[in-house]
Image (cartoon, rainbow, N blue to C red):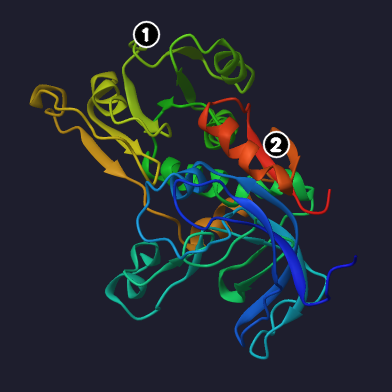
Amino acid sequence: MSKPNNSMQAMVLDKPGQTVHMRSVLRPQPAPDQLLIKIAACAVCRTDLHIVDGELPNPKLPIIPGHEIVGRVVSCGINVHNFAIGERIGIPWLGWTCGHCRYCRNGHENLCTEAKFTGYQIDGGYAEYTVADARYCFRIPEIYDDVEAAPLLCAGLIGYRALKMARNADRIGIYGFGAAAHIVAQILRYQGRKLFAFTRPGDVIAQDFASKMGAAWVGDSDTMPPEELDAAIIFAPTGALVPAALRAIRPGGIVICGGIHMSDIPAFPYDILWREKHLVSVANLTRQDAEEFLTLAPKVPVRVTTESLPLSQADIALMRLREGKFTGAAVLIPGC
């Protein structure tokens, strides 16, 4: 039996701690400022896992997860004039901001207290169609196909924002070598900077992957690098890595926590923070980050290692991500 024209298939989370499951739901219709997008690919992000596992509070429920979305415009709201039907666009995590709070007015819309996020408060990309505010959508560089482009919308953008916080650091450590790290690694190589990659102890596959991405040194996360680092970026959601990274950086260096959720940071002696070391976090992204990164990525060029799965296997993809069994990024494909 064919499905009605106003319905679509989507993977839905009814309650944190449960699995996502396939359901036939009404196809959304665009509001005046929105686009209706037929989804071609949606990457699977650790943030999706934090939502499914109940580690991020107060999601919209039920929710369709997914915020690394690539698709084509099917229709436009009456206020949208900068996109055309059939055009390919990307939809990231930041889905809406108020535009008038102190953060929005001062170039920090990523900190907007009323912000809404794709796949969290706004239904996302684990579906055949979605709607998105056109002001928070971006054109995708032509050198990327749909699958390769999808991880750029979060792994790429958050990785880029974290790297900007490292400023002009020459020796950069990355803790947790997954989707974001392998994109940042290519930018570092393009910029002539030195990468030190830290993985789970004994994770030979991740260490080999980091070496292929240009790391000057790879090792276990519980070891010290052979040189003091100017900066360290932590992508793994493990609080114990914070004191490890503080020990690894030089005086005046910086540790950047790149995830939206992290386990508790254990107590550590003040001595490893002293000497004007900095500890900061990355929160979300801005539209300027997206514009800058999507201009830079083709110049590198950033190439994305992916594994494609059918949309119906979203729960399997999340399970494998939880177990650290992806090299690069997992990408869900509707209709296959």
Image depth: mark 1 or mark 2 in front: 2
- The secondary structure type at the circle numbered 1 is loop
- Compared to residue 160, the image places residue 207 above or below, namely above
- Compared to residue 36, the image places residue 71 above or below, namely above
Residue 102: image location, x then y, percent: 27, 74
| Nearer to us in this view, 186 or 56 | 56
Residue 185: image location, x then y, percent: 55, 30
Q: Identify the residue shown where x is 23% and y is 24%.
A: 243
Q: With 225 as the anchor, is 243 left or right in this view?
A: left
| Residue linked to disc 1 | 226
| Residue linked to disc 2 | 303
Give the number of the disc on residue 49.
none
- The amino acid sitting under disc 2 is Arg
User: How many numbered discs?
Assistant: 2
Q: With 12 as the anchor, is 81 left or right in this view?
A: right
- Mark yes or no: residue 72 visible: yes
- Compared to residue 108, the image places residue 69 above or below, namely above
Residue 24: image location, x then y, percent: 72, 64
- The secondary structure type at the circle numbered 2 is loop
Q: Identify the residue shown where x is 38% and y is 17%.
A: 221
Residue 253: image location, x then y, percent: 26, 30
Q: With 265 as the anchor, is 134 left or right in this view?
A: right
Q: Identify the residue shown where x is 50% and y is 45%.
A: 160
Q: With 246 as the anchor, is 25 left or right in this view?
A: right
| Nearer to us in this view, 51 or 253 | 51
Q: How many neighbours does mark 2 have within 10 angstroms: few (below 14), some (14-19), or many (20 or more)?
A: some
> Which circle's residue, 1 or 2, is located before the other in the chain?
1
Q: How many neighbours does mark 1 have within 10 angstroms: few (below 14), some (14-19), or many (20 or more)?
A: few
